[in-house]
Image (spheres, helix red, strand yellow):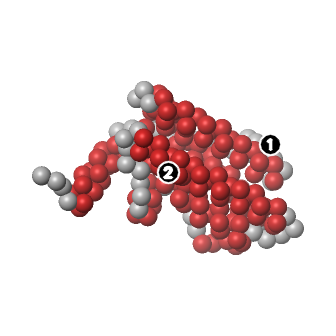
Amino acid sequence: MSNTPEELFAAEQKQAEIDHHVPTAGAMVNHILSNFTVLDAKLHQTKWYVKGLNATAVQAIYAQLIEENRRHLDEVGELLLDENEKPASTTAEYSEYAMIGEGGKNKYFSAAEMIGTTVQDFVTQNLFVDRAIKLAEKENRPALRHYMEQLRGDDNHTIRVLQALLGNNAGDGLEEEDDEDDD
């Protein structure tokens, strides 16, 4: 007997709740996928609203970041499917799982504040990437681990580029705080 779409989605949500409390590598990667969706809006916000003498240069960099972010979103969604996981696919799920915040007031920030916020978003994202790497290793999921390691490198590069716009070295003023216990 086949299940209805409602029953299948309810079962998926029940499993997701369990996986997010354990957590699993798949659940952690779904946080990352959801962060990509919020980050897409935030990157656009900066590109559209940045002002100042360097606005054109910042807009060009953010256009590239939007393209890379969307590529990662698609690749991570496909990777989760390859790993027999269910990637988040609704705005409600993205809102629930995303750990990057957004706000309408941000469009009124200075260019430096906008860029600084983006840097912090990538630092936050790296906390989840690092957890996903550890969980994928623990769960013997080499393809997932490999992609997350590459994503960590891409994020580190983005942080360096954005920090340079602010006149900083890559790690200046950044603290990666992870309240999660290491297993």
Residue behind mark 2? 33
Q: Three-letter amino acid code at disc 2?
A: Leu
Marks 2 and 1: CB-CB under 8 Å? no
Q: Which quarter of the picture shows residue 24?
A: top left
Q: Which quarter of the picture shows residue 169?
A: top right
Dot 1 falls on a residue whose secondary structure is loop
Residue 101 in the image, given as x and y percentages of width and height: 55, 60
Residue shown at 36% from the left, 41% from the top? 84
Q: As drawn, is 146 to the left or to the right of 158? A: left
Q: Nearer the viewer, residue 136 or 79?
A: 79
**Label 2 neighbourhood size at 10 Å, few (<14), some (14-19), many (20+)?**
many
Residue shown at 66% from the left, 38% from the top? 153
Task: Tell me the quarter of the image containing the C terminus.
Answer: top left
Q: Is residue 165 visible?
A: yes
Q: Residue furthest right?
A: 53
Q: Which of the two labelled residues, at mark 2 and mark 1, occupies the earlier sequence position?
A: 2
In the depicted structure, whether residue 68 falls above or below residue 45: above
Q: Nearer the viewer, residue 70 or 124?
A: 70
Residue behind mark 1? 169
Residue 83 in the image, given as x and y percentages of width and height: 41, 39
Q: As drawn, is 21 to the left or to the right of 167? A: left
Q: Residue furthest front?
A: 1
Q: Three-letter amino acid code at disc 1?
A: Asn
Residue shown at 54% from the left, 60% from the top? 38
Q: As drawn, is 60 to the left or to the right of 3? A: right
Dot 2 falls on a residue whose secondary structure is helix
**Label 1 neighbourhood size at 10 Å, few (<14), some (14-19), many (20+)?**
some
Residue shown at 54% from the left, 52% from the top? 73
Residue 76 in the image, given as x and y percentages of width and height: 51, 46
- Camera-near label (2 vs 1) is 2
Give the spatial CA distance, label 2 vs label 1.
Answer: 28 Å
Q: Nearer the viewer, residue 150 or 110?
A: 150
